[in-house]
Image (tube, rainbow, N blue to C red):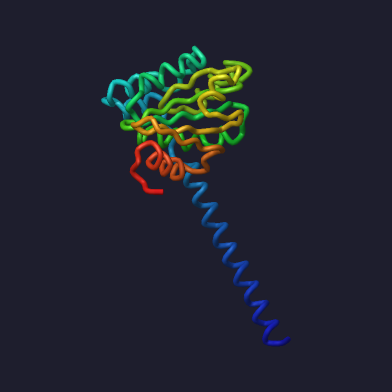
Amino acid sequence: MRVSQLLAAGGAVALLALLAVGLVELSSHSSAQSSAPRLTVAQMRVQLAGSSAPLDSLHAQSGDLLGGGLAAVRARLSALRGAPVVVNKWASWCAPCRAEFAAFARVSVSLGRSVAFFGIDSGESARTAGASFLRAHPVAYPSYYDPSGEAGNAITDSAFTPVTVFYDSRGDQYIHQGPYTSAAALERDVRRYALDTVSA
């Protein structure tokens, strides 16, 4: 075998070894994330107790599926004017939405004293489906039931799910299309687009 062939074979083996190490690290990171203890709604409320009045009213409704449609969503946004806000459009039938809910559960607790979170359960055919999903996947904020999709489309300017909208304290808006694959990625964007604490 020629030297060049030996070098190529050695390079391929080294590349395979690097890929194997990367896959093992990725697997252990994913299992560490998924094994993080899930808080109940009651535990979330305890951790967020003493927040400012507008945020406290959201925490008091943690895990609730509220009615009122677009008018209620706009009224909530109006009540939160001047505060950083994160709105997540989701649906229980949407696999990427389901996958990102753990990230929203974690970040809505870790940043929930300074950022208002709420959801829009958009395009959900049965209210019981969304309510059941919220009981199984608790988050520290309420969602609005939006069977027609009108509220979700109006707020996110998109017919797709999931979509997350960030408002900073001035009311400037940033829209993120697609799911968040980790709590770290979501927290980075909350800090960047809602809190203005991370430079782009």
Above or below, comparing residue 136 to residue 187 in the picture: above
Q: Is residue 168 left or right of residue 89?
A: left
For the residue pair 126 and 69, the one nearer the viewer reads as 69
Above or below, comparing residue 116 to residue 79 in the picture: below
Q: Residue at the spot x=52%, y=43% of the render? A: 181
Above or below, comparing residue 139 to residue 31 in the picture: above
Where is residue 79, by image quadrant?
A: top left
Where is residue 51, by image quadrant?
A: top left
Q: From the top left corner, tell me how far across and down residue 139 is, in percent.
A: 44, 28
Q: Is residue 102 left or right of residue 18?
A: left
Q: From the top left corner, tell me how far across and down residue 45 is, in percent.
A: 35, 25
Q: From the top left corner, tell me how far across and down residue 66 is, in percent.
A: 48, 15
Q: Most extreme residue toward the top, as rendered?
A: 68
Q: Residue at the spot x=41%, y=36% of the render? A: 107
What number of labels is visible?
0
Q: Is residue 65 left or right of residue 50?
A: right
Q: Most extreme residue toward the right, as rendered?
A: 1
For the residue pair 21 and 119, the one nearer the viewer reads as 119
Q: From the top left corner, tell me how far across and down residue 1 is, in percent.
A: 73, 86
Q: Residue at the spot x=60%, y=21% of the render? A: 124
